Amino acid sequence: MTFSRRDFHKIALAAGAFVALPGGTFAAAEEPVSGGTLKIVYFPEPTQLVAINTSAGGPQFIGAKIFDGLLTYDYDLAPKPSLAKEWTISPDGREYIFRLRDGAKFHDGKPVTSADVAFSVLRLKEAHPRGRAIFSQVTDVDTTDPLVAKIRLAKPSPGLITALAGSESPIVPKHIFETFKPTESPKPDQIIGSGPFVLKEWVPGSHILLERNAAYWDAPRPYLDRVIIRLINDAGARAAALETGEGDIGPNPVPLGDLERLKGISKLQIDDRIYAYAGQQNQLVINLENPYRKELKVRQAIAHAIDVKALIDIVLYGYAIPSPTPISPGLAKFHNPDIPFAKFDIALAEKLLDEAGYPRKEGGKRFKLRVTNNPFNPQTYSDFIAQALIKIGIEPDIQKFDFGTYVKVVYTDRTWDLSVESLSNTFDPTAGVQRVYWSKNFKIGLPFSNASHYENPEVDRLLEAAAAEPDIEKRAQYFKDFQVIIARDLPVINLVSPIQPVVGSVKVQSYAQGAEGLGGNISRAWLKA
């Protein structure tokens, strides 16, 4: 596959080469002004508001404004203080000591202590799809001093130091969250964090209202008086809201086909930087609990039937980087560049299906597969995959769901065959990638985990070795060897890293302060008159 100049530009963006676009105002030169209401347009409708037992986008995006993490990060993932004002890591990488801020409080007035850190870390280890890997080596957390949390590990976990932002690893109040099971979500009146904004109202299907935390430890921030998150599932309606001023900003809010037109509107800014805490990866996940899909030649045939270049051009309007491996080119030091896409070849796909024992029957059909799509992706995604299947004689049964139903169907009921999933590579493969392929991360009801039910002992060994390897070169080699096996076994057909622009009014200043972008706590955001 060849890349255009635009493709290389976008690969540079994914690798962290951030650039300012014409008309975009990503950092304010003026002094911030306090006050005002920021209106964020958002989709899909979240089912909960804190990412303690899920890696879903809604709890991450919204929860980061309500719950702080121990650390935050600049654009290059260098850690910065948040709830932890200081930290040290032992030379052997097996103890992390965090000194907490004296005076940081939850919204109910209770102080943030090391007991809350211990509870949060251990719950993330148990119940979070990515935390199960990142915190897997944690043995205990010493809470002797209420302002010092000592996290002890059986083996090093080099990805841990970059996993402590509020969107990824929120620190939750032990006295509230210990009252319900790890698999349960808190009720609205239990959404009590220590972050810059307080949850005041959640009207499903309409909006979420956040108000300024007047007792926030990082005074005089936040600058905004309130944030209204408008829940608008229709992309055209979101675009209209931004054009008319009914909305101020949104992550990936508009139809991709509208972006070129919107770039010509002087009152709007388009930010297509890729932030390290995002790094989306689109893949066609294959449910291996089925005789058709267990057959390798069937999976190979499906891979050969997908024209990735056409997918990028037609479905994603060019806003994607080809990504044939589980680790995208954006994580350059871990990505294996020697692995190509399966060649787009309909005749070869047909031959493989014949060899697998599934010839075309009367009417030209071989068998039926249920195809669904994470609604965070364009809805045309599953239609594109369906057309690819039709060409090789597989009858697609397209199933479209709202977000909550999608998660239940794929990760709890498991009543699906192929799913176009949207999962983030994030800041480290142990967090963003391992969860999809690690056999120990197959768990009924655990969202955004090993949906394929893939099991390979050598893959487990490589992932576990990489997760604990402090030497960067050895770690990279483990991940590269892992990618070779996945390309051979094809439990997942990796497709692209989509670029999901932020669109907003030029009056919105300083919304992105580091690796989390608009998905961070936005305590420094302000509105220019």
Image (cartoon, rainbow, N blue to C red):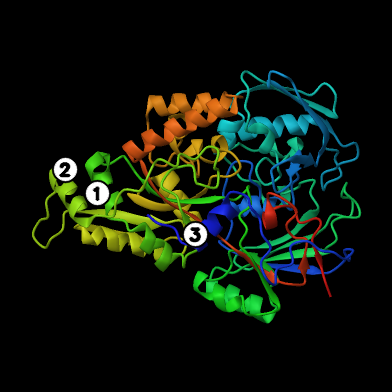
The answer, for residue 57, to whether it is visible in the render is yes
User: Which comes before the other along the chain, label 3 or label 2?
Assistant: 3
Question: Is 361 in front, or is 176?
Answer: 361
Q: Which mark is residue 126?
A: none
Residue displayed at 63% across by 50% down: 16
Q: Which residue is mark 2?
A: 356
The residues bearing labels 2 and 1 have C-alpha atoms spaced at a distance of: 10 Å
What residue is disc 1 on?
Answer: 301
Q: Tell me the quarter of the picture where residue 27 sits.
A: bottom right
Q: Amino acid at mark 2?
A: Ala
Number of other residues with Cα within 10 Å of mark 2, as a class: few under 14, some 14 to 19, many 20 or more: some
Which of discs 3 and 2 lies nearer the camera? The answer is 3
SS at circle 1? helix
Of the two numbered discs 2 and 1 on the same chain, state the one appearing first in sequence. Answer: 1
Q: Position of residue 103 (x, y in %)?
A: 91, 40
In depth, the one of 114 and 328 nearer the eye is 328
Cα distance, mark 3 to mark 2? 36 Å
Quadrant in which residue 382 is drawn: bottom left
Residue 172 appears in the rendering: no
Instruction: Name which quarter of the figure residue 154 lies in.
Output: top right
Residue for point 50% across, 35% down? 434
Residue 122 placement (x, y as % from top left): 65, 30
Dot label at residue 7: 3
Q: Amino acid at mark 3?
A: Asp
Q: Label 1 sits on what residue type? A: Ala
